[in-house]
Amino acid sequence: MPTNIYALLTPIALGFILLEILVCWYYKKSYITFQEAVANFGTALGNQTMNVLVAAGVFVVYGYLWENYRLIDSLEMNAITFLVLLLGIDFIFYWVHRWGHHINIMWAAHSPHHSAEEMNFFVALRASVTQRLFSFFFFWPLTLFGFKPIDIYAMTGLHLFISFLHHTELIPKLWRWIEFIFTTPSHHRVHHGINFAYLDKNFGEFLIVWDRLFNTYAEEEEKVVYGMYNPPRSWNPISINFHYYILLWKDAVAAPYWIDKLKIWFMPLGWRPRGLPPKPALQEVTQENQVRFQTKMFWRAKPYLILHILLGIVLMMFIIDPNSPWGTAERWIGSFLLWHMIINWSGIMESKEWLFFSEIGRLIITCSAIIYFSHAPIYSPLNLLWIVISLISSVWTIRYFRIYLPLKYNRQP
């Protein structure tokens, strides 16, 4: 299996996240909130399972196009072809990104990223499980110019990492010539804004010149309000990922005409099927009237979630790392276990009644699967470590995550 660029970039991204946390703590900046950070990180872990599937599809479909229809026979990577490929991906992505804000089905794929209500490196990780799939529907022309599928896939990963660096409030506006050519954190803050002046602006990921050329540029002036209109209002990664799909589906079901049931997916945002009432006019969300989503967590949830975030990273690396000892079936099972984990995080943060039995079951199943996948004796050090962690986690869940305990004992004050 080819090297997974995301497995290589993950430690670097985690380093930047840790650095941002430390800087915010040192300078007492409230740019990162615990609940949204956990939801963002969980969404990112789940999204990595989709990247494995996308990679497989890219190497099959793009490989076929490259083998049979490429115009240039030997296009090897060097400084010039590297830059050309980066610019090609950036140009295509500008239009994919722009369409993602204007076409219903593409907004459904992209909107989970915009549902975050703050701006930090955790938000950069909040990507939809369908966004990557949609993006690769558009990069295939690069194979016709002779770029190898593995180079395209690797470059899209690097391109994504460039965009990761834009998601912060710690970096102010930069020198004018940088701001004129390249996309900066200031530009991308505008892109995430729901201020009316900022809507559908600054789609560029590497170069901001595309926005200047195609009249979608806006300068950061007034304070940015982050989020989206009609957000999911949940920490559950299923709700975050499929919120807008569900809204479209409901409208499609309610539409009286069959053609409108199909059209709605490909029409601009705000379009309504015949026979349905028009959407109410948007009321601008401002710093003064924004009500950010917050929930009461189970008591003593923070240390538990921090521990299991670390375990989630380990589980993710077993799934996506090409050098992992796990086979295909084990990676599939691991992906389901990872999704079970991040869904349960939302249950902990929202104090859901179903969480108790779901978490106890998850701990038993996950521990058993990892021990089985290790192909080592149950008394080996790593297996014993998993057993101890699972037992402590089970006791913690029994003690603190039961909804029928008195409120003062089972929810965080």
Image (spheres, grey):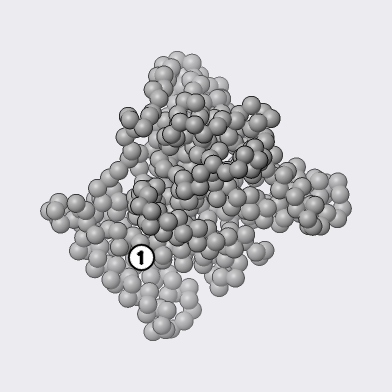
For mark 1, give the secondary structure. helix
Extreme residue in the front direction: 175
Around disc 1, counting alpha carbons within 10 Å, would you say few (fewer than 14), some (14 to 19), or many (20 or more)?
Answer: few
Location of residue 358 (image quadrant): bottom left
Q: Using residue 285 as the reference point, say whether residue 191 is left or right of it.
A: right
Please tell me which residue lies in front, 204 or 357: 204
Viewer can see residue 211: yes
Q: Could you tell me residue 355's position as x and y percent?
A: 28, 54
Q: Using residue 47 as the reference point, say whether residue 39 is left or right of it.
A: left
Image quadrant in which the N terminus is located: bottom right
The residue that label 1 is drawn on is 307
Label count reads 1
Please tell me which residue lies in front, 238 or 31: 31
Q: Could you tell me residue 156's position as x and y percent?
A: 65, 50
Q: Using residue 388 as the reference point, say whether residue 103 is left or right of it.
A: right
Q: Using residue 80 as the reference point, say whether residue 176 is left or right of it.
A: left
Viewer can see residue 336: no
Image height of 217 relative to 73, above or below: above
Location of residue 321 (image quadrant): bottom right
Residue type at the position of mark 1: Leu
Residue depicted at x 37% and y 49%: 29
Residue depicted at x 30% and y 59%: 302
Residue depicted at x 67% and y 56%: 154
Please tell me which residue lies in front, 261 or 288: 288
Image height of 374 relative to 140, above or below: below
Q: Could you tell me residue 406's position as x and y percent?
A: 12, 53
Q: Could you tell me residue 199's position as x and y percent?
A: 51, 29
Image height of 244 relative to 167, above or below: above
